[in-house]
Image (cartoon, coloured by chain):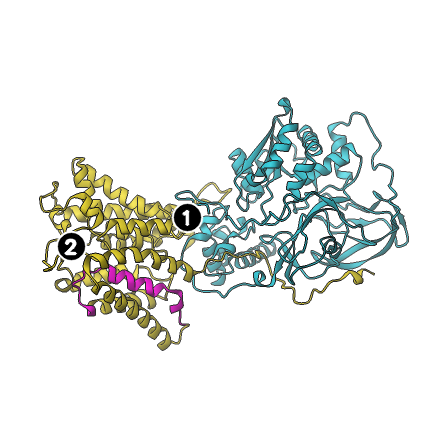
Amino acid sequence: MKIKLMRKREGVYNEVRKERTDERPIEAATVPEYLVFPLNMHIGAPANPIVEVGDKVKIGTLIAEKKGNISANIYASVSGEVFDISDQPTVKGIAPCITIKNNYKEEWEEPFYSENDKLTVTQMKEVIDKAGIVGMGGATFPTSVKLSPPSGTRIDTLIINGAECEPYSTADHRLMVEHAVELIEGVRILARILDVNQVYVALESDTHDSAEEMKKIIDQEDHIDIVELETIYPQGSEKNLIKKLTNREVPSGGLPADVHTVVVNVATALAVYEAIHLRRPSIERITTVSGEPIKEPKNLRVRIGTPISYLIDDCHGFCTNPGKMIHGGPMMGTTINSGRIPITKGTSVITFLEKGEALRSDRTSCIKCSECLNVCPVSLQPILISQAYENGDLDKAERLGALDCIDCGNCSYICPAKIPLLDNIRAAKKEIRSRQEAK
Amino acid sequence: MVEKYEFDTNGLVMSPSPHLFSKRTSAWIMQQVIIALIFPAIAGTYFFGLKVLIMLFVGIFSSVLFEYLYQKISRKKVTISDYSAVVTGMLIALSLPVTAPLWSIILGSGFAILIVKQIPGGIGRNVFNPAVAARVMLKLFFSPWITNWVTPEPDVVATATPLESIGYFSKTVPEEIPDLWDLFLGIGLGGNIGETSKLAILIGLAYLVIRGIINLKIPVLYVLTVAIIMSIYGDFSFTYMMSHVLSGTLLFGATYMATDYSSGPLTPDGKTVFAIGCGMLTAVIRIVFNFPGGVGFAILIMNALAPTIDKYLAPRIYGHKKRILRNSLN
């Protein structure tokens, strides 16, 4: 048990349950017969399908084109034919998807861009954009947009986020251990594009072996620092990483670029390497499937579009009945109830919880223990925002900084009175936003 | 098509994140406080005899009963299972001398639970710490019955509390004050049951800190403030300073009363100000007046100020330049 006497904790030491998968090498997941590609698998406008039912595709065939500035291309991850284009269950609810029937021939499309000995920075950005790479830590923000800060905004620091803080996630950890060479190469590309001198690769101290792997590879002149941070949730939150590594704070409502910083997830950096060096678009990712009900939890290399039920089979099913299936980790993930929901570019972990773990306890009165303030990584007063919302005082909730909440869930997690603090803050945020839009 | 790969999804719970919750409950926290209070209770029983156990029982029983009856009569949810009334009852019993009549414990419990805690709305809504308020109320209005200090000797002699000999602008430590080691262990000392053995209090404090119920900020700053002021006032006499630190309710109050969640401030900086404020008031009361009870008054005054302190010292939110302005919070 960790004891912090005087200092603010800025997080919770929730029970880390990575031990079932953190030493398991990444395995290739079963490639299913049908793969489902949600057109909205990234943040921003859904991609526009450019194939029709019956079209033949290969691995790396562009099947949906980005639409607008914040959007991303989608590529087929198997060879076969377009089976269906219709609404299907996804993490974001029922949404338009392209379904591809696998012919198991593993035919590859020609490289998605023609080789060029020396890509300019602009060309590299174009390749990354074309490859459909989005933030693979879960935010799914198009990476090329991140790499093109508005003119006049100087970026001097690049942070590579390997601080995987959700209790069961080990996909990034295994990636750092097993693909350190490629990852660091991807980091060098990113550093070149952004023209930064300072690069931090941040990870949690319990993944010490991955730090060792990467330190072996870095050259003296790289200016890449591997930083081991305390294992605490939410260490991997972008705003907190920036504060911890550079002592800069992203202004309220602002972006990391406002403090000359760009944060990129380790899986994204690997995808950048694959796009530039292997001339391969974003068609697969590493996903952890874990939780107590899973018989054999694993880190799997998964083709984008694989329905979750296949991964469960890869893990030999359940040892106990799951009470919750979570896309993401238990702190910030979204509950889902269909095994048909596919793995997308942003799926870093699928967590299963037992029935007993999944239920909430009865709420009691607030005893003013201050724990929600102690654990809030952005120094909010969660209980006051929650009370303001329950009293119908949206103005007060807004003044208390409801919109600065990063949804980490620490307050609800820690509350001994089991007050649904984050539920209330989220509801307050939603109403404040809709009120702002109405104005 | 993909249906055949469905697994049994019936009974999967759908709910917003987070999906994990800490196992701590309010009742568990109160249980830890009760365990921490057992240490001074054992010391008290050792020094003052078995009547202490009776007093503890009366305090706990009457506090819980008052809470139960109030909630039954006012048709509110009965919350005695959160153990907070037990804590209040223990604190009241432990903050009285062994000569205090049992009716004074019942009176104190009724005052604490009904007037101080339940009428403002129950746990978390009370401005004042119920046990401290009860203690001060008894001291103010029932002094003859509850402040005849006794030393734990066979023939129970009424003595002055050590504080009376060092208070009232006195800067020197008179002869009759016990030596520091006796003060620390509680040997041959008159006073309230719980505050006798500083050793037992510190064990309880350590327990609460290790369990993560409180952190050291409030107790340390509180005692340190008193120690610094007394050092300066006492011309840097170590004995004078330590006599103040080890006398009276200071350590007991700093450990079990000033750290009360409900009546203390919510914000981290507020806790700092609160603790230093308690220390300054305690020191001033002890220097200026020649009556014991500075700790109780100091904590009550700071309890009253806590909401205001919180408003001025709201934490600066990440990414904001300033703290939230106090006026915007009303």
Q: Earlier in the sequence, mark 2 or mark 1?
A: 2
Whether residue B119 is situated above or below residue B207 in the rendered picture = below
Report the predominant secondary structure element of the magenta stretch: helix
User: Crowdedness of circle 2 by 10 Å Cα count: few (<14), some, many (20+)?
Assistant: many
Q: Position of residue B195 (x, y in %)?
A: 23, 54
Examine the image and state in which quarter residue A285 appears. top right
Q: Amino acid at mark 1?
A: Ala
Give the SS element for disc 2: loop
Cα–Cα gap, marks 2 and 1 = 42 Å
Q: Is residue A183 left or right of residue B5?
A: left
Is residue B90 on the magenta stretch?
A: yes
Q: What residue range appears in magenta?
A: B78-103
Q: Position of residue A97 (x, y in %)?
A: 79, 55
The one nearer the camera, B321 or B22, is: B22
Whether residue A115 is situated above or below residue A434 in the rendered picture = above
Q: Position of residue A432 (x, y in %)?
A: 55, 56
Q: Colour of chain A?
A: cyan
Which residue matches tag 2? B190
User: Crowdedness of circle 1 by 10 Å Cα count: few (<14), some, many (20+)?
Assistant: many
Q: In the image, what residue occupies the spot 28% across and 70% down?
A: B62
